[in-house]
Amino acid sequence: MSRSFNNADRKGPSFNSFQGTDSSLLVADLIDQHRQWDLTAVSSNFGQAEIDRILSIPLSIFPSEDALIWNGTTSGNYMVKSGYYFATSLAEHQDAGSTYVYENWWSKFWKLKLPSKLRIFVWKVFHNAIPVAAELHRKHIANTPYCPLCKQQQETIPHALFLCTRAKEVWRLSSIKLNFKLAATSSAEEFLFYASDNTSTSDFEQFLTICWSIWYERNAEFHDKSPKQPAAVLAFATDYLGKYQSAQAQSVSNNSAATSITHPASRSQVAASTDQWIAPLAGKFKLNTDAACNKASKIIGLGAVLRDSSGLIKAAFSKAIKGCYKAEEMEATALVHALQWLLNLGLTADIIETDSLLVVQGLKAASSCSSAFHAILNDVNYLVSSFPRAQITHVKRSANTYADVLAKFALTVDTDCTWLEEFPPPLMTVM
């Protein structure tokens, strides 16, 4: 990391008070040689609110290039839905009742089974952001405000989607039963509310897809492509939505049927959770990890224990690091330090257990994400690739007691503790 730490590094509204005291300060200047936040450097440059915020950001053990992260999603990737919620959260002086209506409508909308391009289109319609002739003429971009297809009326969004001669014929052929005459005296937003309130979920999905298909055909014809018959426009919309929803249903079915997965980077498998600790097979070793946090002192405790098929402890550690992350980030960090610790000792693990389901699910997913959490998961995948037979498994807390006790013990001592071929004294309380 080499970029300057300034106002551009704010991650969200909760960071509004951030003010760097030294414009030449780099993020790298705040990280020590152990890839942890340097408390001395952080404390000497920032106030307590900023210190707490910085210590909430987990650090990868491997230096990497800077990347832009959208803090409105768990993946770190920008989505229209999260952008909308962020924008509305910044809106001021809105009537409480009106806000509830909008939030309720958008909540229903985001649950619809629609492809992303269609969601974006509807969002633009709702906010009068599609380039109809009337709006382009108002901005002195188009020579005329009239509809380029029927040339009879000014082309507003309601006209283009519902009132143009071509659009009317498509709706007449469809199974959607609405009073489209209302569009003449309604805004696009108002008619979307009306359609949502007067159709079933499946019909509303079909309604929005037909709107998109009508607009798609309008643009094609505007750019001198041969016009389609209204029946063909309707058939295209029906077929498009049907294929999309069938593909989504098949994807969900495939994911549900899968019981394990081989990760391309780590070749680690994810198995089902259990209630009690179970010894591995003869000749195998099982690693359990956990994390705990003292929020007041901003210290994270990490615990790990390696046991054989007889349940005997081969190695264990209890370690504290600086910070106070989200629960899943701390659990992933515990895995990173435990795997690094095993590699340094020359030990191996065949089964790796954590009581964080989010970590296991994150390792199972093959999607490309940019969040701090996923940066730590990348560390896990890199390290676990050194254990080619290792399975990463979720267990319940009751099956992870030893690691839990060692993680909490780390919060009470000032030094890292490692035990080899001996029973750690802190575990005497849970024998």
Image (cartoon, rainbow, N blue to C red):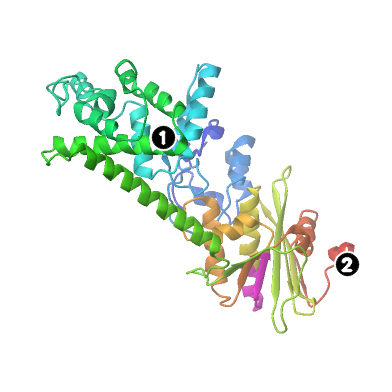
Q: Is residue 6 visible?
A: no
Q: Which of 264 and 32 is in front in this view?
A: 264
Q: Which of marks 1 and 2 is nearer the N terminus?
A: 1
Q: Nearer the viewer, residue 210 or 421?
A: 210
Q: Give the range drawn in magenta.
A: 339-353
Q: How crowded is mark 2: few (under 14 residues within 10 Å), some or many (20 or more)?
A: few
Q: On screen, 102 above or below 282? A: above
Residue drawn where x is 72% and y is 64% of the image? 274
Residue 351 falls within the magenta-colored stretch = yes
Residue 306 drawn at (x, y percent):
73, 72
Residue drawn where x is 17% and y is 40% of the image? 228
The answer to which image quadrant residue 309 occupies is bottom right
Q: Is mark 1 on a helix, strand or loop?
A: helix
Q: How many marks?
A: 2
Residue 370 drawn at (x, y percent):
47, 52
Residue 29 falls within the magenta-colored stretch = no
Residue drawn where x is 80% and y is 59% of the image? 405
- Which residue lies under the disc numbered 2? 431
Q: What element carries label 2?
A: loop
Residue 157 drawn at (x, y percent):
28, 25
Q: On screen, 16 above or below 33? A: above
Q: How crowded is mark 1: few (under 14 residues within 10 Å), some or many (20 or more)?
A: some
